[in-house]
Amino acid sequence: MEPWLQPAALRQARRICVSFQRWTGRSLLPNPAEDDWSLGQQLFDWSQPVLSHGSEADPILNYGNQAALTLWEYLWTEWVQLPSRFTAEPMAQAERSTLLAQAARQGYTSHYSGIRISRTGRRFRIENACIWTVLDEAGNPVGQAATFDHWRFL
């Protein structure tokens, strides 16, 4: 079975989608599937990058759909062991931290643009990003997620 269809990944996909709906009032996916397996596959296959990390002191990525994995040039097994700070260049860390703190305070933030870096050092600019707090089934914060609809290589 593909790693994004394992129970923990399916639970995270559901949390990502439900939390996005809660904070923004709109659906992350067009016509989201009802069952977890179909939703997990739908989110993984979606053309818009989606990624999330946990709530550790140095948060570790715990989800990336195919668009995110391709853009950052990682395999799933590498991605889910990576501190999320490595998705941005060292010089962009302060800006990234401020943005994540704002999203944590407000539940979400949108319209962010910034420079990111792939595993091989390829730089790209993300545009119109939305970052939101991911909640568990009891409504407790368990991390953050992001998506964006446009990027360009630099």
Image: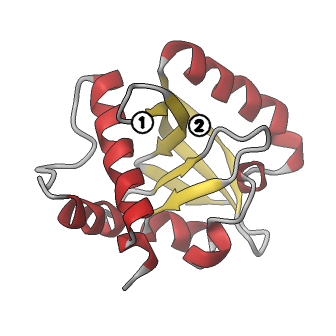
Q: Secondary structure at mark 1?
A: loop
Circle 2: residue type:
Ser
Tell me which residue sits at (45%, 46%) in the image.
Answer: 148
Q: Residues within 10 Å of mark 1 (few under 14, many from 20)?
A: some
Question: In the rendered view, does 152 fall on the left or right side of 59?
Answer: left
User: Does 7 appear above or below 141?
Assistant: below
Residue 109 place in picture, x, y as percent: 50, 23
Residue 144 place in picture, x, y as percent: 54, 37
Tell me which residue sits at (45%, 50%) in the image.
Answer: 150
Question: On the image, numbered disc 2 is attached to which residue?
Answer: 113
Question: In the rendered view, does 144 fall on the left or right side of 65?
Answer: right
Question: On the image, numbered disc 1 is attached to which residue?
Answer: 136
Please state which of residues 49 and 37 is positioned toward the viewer in this rendering: 37
Q: Quadrant of the C terminus?
A: bottom right
Nearer-N-terminus badge (2/1) = 2
The residue most toward the right is 91
Tell me which residue sits at (56%, 23%) in the image.
Answer: 103
Q: Quadrant of the N terminus?
A: bottom left
Circle 1: residue type:
Asp
Residue 117 place in picture, x, y as percent: 73, 59
